[in-house]
Image (tube, grey):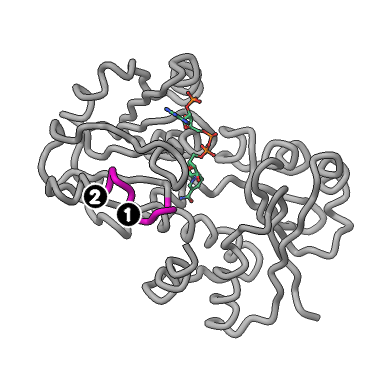
Amino acid sequence: MSARVGVVGWPVAHSRSPAIFAHWFAHYGIEATYEVIPVSPDDAERFFADFAGSPYRGVNVTIPHKTTAFAHVKADAAASAMGAVNTLWRDGTVICGTSSDGDGFLASLDQGAPGWDDHAGPAVILGAGGAARSIVHALVAKGRPVIVANRSADKANALAVASGAKAIALAHLGDALAEASVFVNATSLGMEGEPPLTVDLSPMQANTVVADIVYVPLETPLLAQAKAKGLRPVDGLGMLLHQATVGFERWFGLFPAVDDTLRQMVAATL
Ligand code: NAP
């Protein structure tokens, strides 16, 4: 029987995951369906509590259910650090969960800016929301020095305490950029319909990396500035694609490629 997997969220119709998985199913000859599974906040507790009895081999979990799902799974280290999961799979009768955004982000840097970690300087992360937290935890777990700044300073401070990163005030961002190996926009600024991110990248050293996790548009004003200044831009599509490899590998036992064909196919939908 064809395996059933999918993405659980509310709303979830906009998800690019079905297109990503359809590409891999065709490429690897896997008979499976990837479904969009809308679950309302009122039904989420019951959905995840009963997941073992569901027809799904595994699911991705997106907003607003990542913390609800976390309470019903055996969480790995990445998920425990976050208190949230985005990928569920079965290990016998046990439902396991991880949070793959952080490692997905690191894989996007490895692919988009090989050798980025040869520079010993800190990774400077702007933002302290869900995505920033996963990125900071993944970088710290990799042994990298990390600096966090955020509009709401209390959230940056809390993230620093929880992760072992260092928090700074926004006013000191320019100083931090001067020594940074990589600067990451992990806020929603620059996304279509949101205000642009206005950060001057002039203090950054030549050839250092500027990553934006916003992927609509693919080239944000921040990345355009990075390109114009001779820095190394990395867009947010890589993170989106690489975080999906984790579920595929858990459910089907093989690690799928994130190649140009996949990138171009998904980019065309943005
Ligand atoms: P979130 O939890 O709501 O966090 C939003 C972050 O943006 C917070 O740090 C917030 O600061 C900051 N922010 C929002 N509006 C701001 C403004 N006007 N000025 C300054 N800071 C502002 O959201 P999230 O889930 O982390 O997602 C953030 C972005 O990442 C979204 O655009 C999302 O689409 C993108 N994303 C991309 C991927 C990918 O795979 N590429 C994955 C996940 C998310 P405060 O704390 O001060 O509110």
Whether disc 1's CB lies below 8 Å from ligand 1 is answered no
Q: Residue furthest bottom?
A: 29
Residue 219 counted in the magenta span: yes
Q: Mark 1 highlights which residue?
A: 219
Q: Mark 2 highlights which residue?
A: 224
- In the visual, does 127 lie left or right of 31? left
Q: Where, by quadrant of the figure, is residue 66 drawn?
A: top right
- In the visual, does 47 lie left or right of 228? right
Look at the image and give the residue range highlighted in magenta.
Answer: 215-224
Q: Are dots 2 and 1 in contact, CB under 8 Å?
A: yes
Of labels 2 and 1, earlier in sequence is 1
Residue 25 counted in the magenta span: no
Residue 131: x %, y % from top left:
50, 39
Residue 78: x %, y % from top left:
55, 40
The amino acid type, in three-letter code, at marker 2 is: Ala
Note whether 146 is above or below 193 in the view shown.
above
Most frequent secondary structure within the magenta stretch: loop
Q: Quadrant of the N terminus?
A: bottom right
